Image (cartoon, helix red, strand yellow):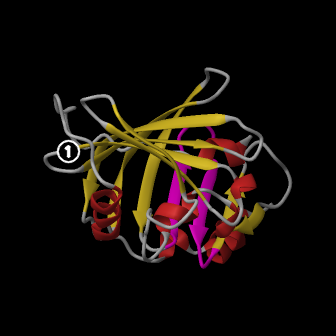
Amino acid sequence: MMRRIALAAAFAFAPVAAFAQQLSLQEISNYLNAFSTAQGAFTQVNADGSIDTGTIQIKRPGRIRFDYDTNGSMFISGGGQVAIFDANSNEAPQRFPLSETPLSIILAENVDLSRAGMVTGHSSDGTSTTVTAQDPQHPEYGSIQLVFTANPVELRQWVVTDDTGTPTTVVLNDVQTGARIGDRPFNIQAEMDSWGR
């Protein structure tokens, strides 16, 4: 459950533009590659309709952190690993490679959506462009759907469908890009040492 919850996010940086042209995969890749850090608050809508809130920090490449207000749970990616700190569990945090999650696509050092087999959907509804992507070598890991507006290009929504086929959406509020973020928030071992479980 926590793995599904933490693998999705939506970036609400600006009002939706009207009648935006469809963005090319190159334009989207360029935007993601220029995106380095961000932080803000999120409201998450889970597949069962429940809602969680919290804060998010991103530091590309490879690092992202969700802190949940609801119960103090955390999802941290750093050093090529992902760790889920579930406050409702008495067990140690669950760990697995970042490469096994769809987040690895947009947290990569060089995002290239033109790679063969990566993009499985690319469309526009006149106001936004939607791209669905997966790891072409491991489609079984799930997919990530990104919704962008244009002029300027901005990522508005991010929905992950995990390896069980369950989608999760998170909407971010008051997100600030270009924020100064250190490395400590993404140090999984340091968090495990202080988790005490």
Frontmost residue, 103 versus 46: 103
Q: Quadrant of residue 35?
A: bottom left
Up-down relation of residue 194 to residue 45 (above or below): below
Residue 197 appears left or right of 174 = right
Percent x, y of residue 25: 35, 57
In the rendered image, residue 67 lying in the magenta stretch gets the answer yes
Where disc 1 sits, the SS reads: loop
Q: Residue at x 67, y 22 (%)?
A: 48
Farthest residue toward the top?
Answer: 49
Instruction: Look at the image and tell me whether residue 72 can be seen.
Output: no
In the rendered image, residue 125 lying in the magenta stretch gets the answer no
Instruction: Look at the image and tell me whether residue 96 can be seen.
Output: yes
Magenta range is 62-80
- The quarter of the rendered structure image containing the C terminus is bottom right
Q: Which residue is mark 1?
A: 150
Q: Residue at x 44, y 64 (%)?
A: 114
What's the residue type where badge 1 is placed? Ala
Residue 90 appears left or right of 120 = right
